[in-house]
Structure formats: structure tokens, C-alpha cells
Image (cartoon, rainbow, N blue to C red):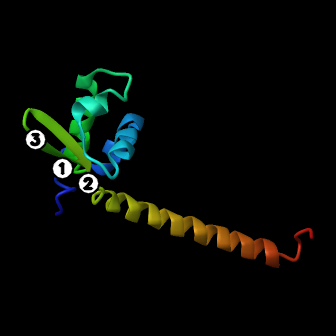
Amino acid sequence: MGEAASAKHDVFQAIADPTRRELLQLLGGRELPLKDISGRFPMSRTAVSKHLRILAEAGLVQERKVGRETRYRLDADPLLELKRWLEYYERFWENKLSLLKHYVETDPDAEP
């Protein structure tokens, strides 16, 4: 069983909240301290910290202490689980739409 599977929160739970999705976008490609992150959201630093903790428990955010400051950065690897799950449904719907197209184009009773 992988590290993401043993996490306290899974990737799906972690990204369910729009604030956490926004945090992931903010951290994409850069490391930021909590004070810089919390200044970008209309909520308390404690609330932002709780969101970051959930993301960290899902393995989506890495924490690093620099002196008295905690810095956060994105770890996108656990998102591969989400990508694989979505790919299955993408293939499912592509197949269904292909069958529908074939049916519509070959149905002799269909109007031109």
C-alpha cells in the first residue's frame, strides 16, 4: 500500500474544498511561508493552517522549517491517483459518445 493510501486524508477529500484547490495552485512551482500564504485569503492564519495540514496529510503539500518559519510547497505526485481515476471515466465517456455517433450516423430511420 502506498504512502498516499495510508494518509489521514486522501487526495479526493483534500481537493474537495475550493480553498485547498486554490492553495495548491498558489503553491505550484514555489515555496511560500505561512504568513505570505495566509495574506492571500480572507480567513485567519489558523484557518489557512488547517487547510494546509489537510493537504499535507494527503501528501499534496510538503512542510519545511526555516528558522521559526514554516514554508510550504506543492508535491503533485499524489495527484497521479486522481489523474488515473479521471482517465478511466474519460475513456468511458469517449466510448459512449463514439457509440452514439456511430448509431446516429448509421440509423436508417434518422432524419438527415
Residue 92 appears anywhere in the view: yes
Q: CA distance from mark 1 to mark 2?
A: 14 Å
Per the image, the residue denoted by label 1 is: 7
SS for tag 2? loop
Give coordinates of residue 78: x percent, y percent.
Answer: 28, 57
- Outermost residue, right side: 112
Q: CA distance from mark 3 to mark 2?
A: 16 Å
Q: Residue at x 59, y 69 (%)?
A: 94
Per the image, the residue denoted by label 3 is: 65
Q: Residues within 10 Å of mark 3 (few under 14, many from 20)?
A: few
Residue 95, by quadrant, is: bottom right
Task: Please name whichever residue, 24 or 110, is drawn nearer the observer in this view of the structure.
Answer: 24
In this rendering, the label closer to the viewer, 3 or 1: 3
SS for tag 3? strand
Q: CA distance from mark 3 to mark 1?
A: 21 Å
The reply to whether discs 1 and 2 touch (Cβ–Cβ < 8 Å) is no
Give coordinates of residue 22: x percent, y percent.
Answer: 40, 39
Which label was assigned to residue 76?
none
Residue 16 appears anywhere in the view: no
Q: Amino acid at mark 3?
A: Lys
Per the image, the residue denoted by label 2 is: 75
- Placement of the N terminus among the 4 image quadrants: bottom left
In this rendering, the label closer to the viewer, 3 or 2: 3
Q: Residue at x 66, y 67 (%)?
A: 97
Instruction: Give whichever of discs 3 and 1 has the lower sequence position.
Output: 1
Give coordinates of residue 102: x percent, y percent.
Answer: 73, 76
- Placement of the C terminus among the 4 image quadrants: bottom right
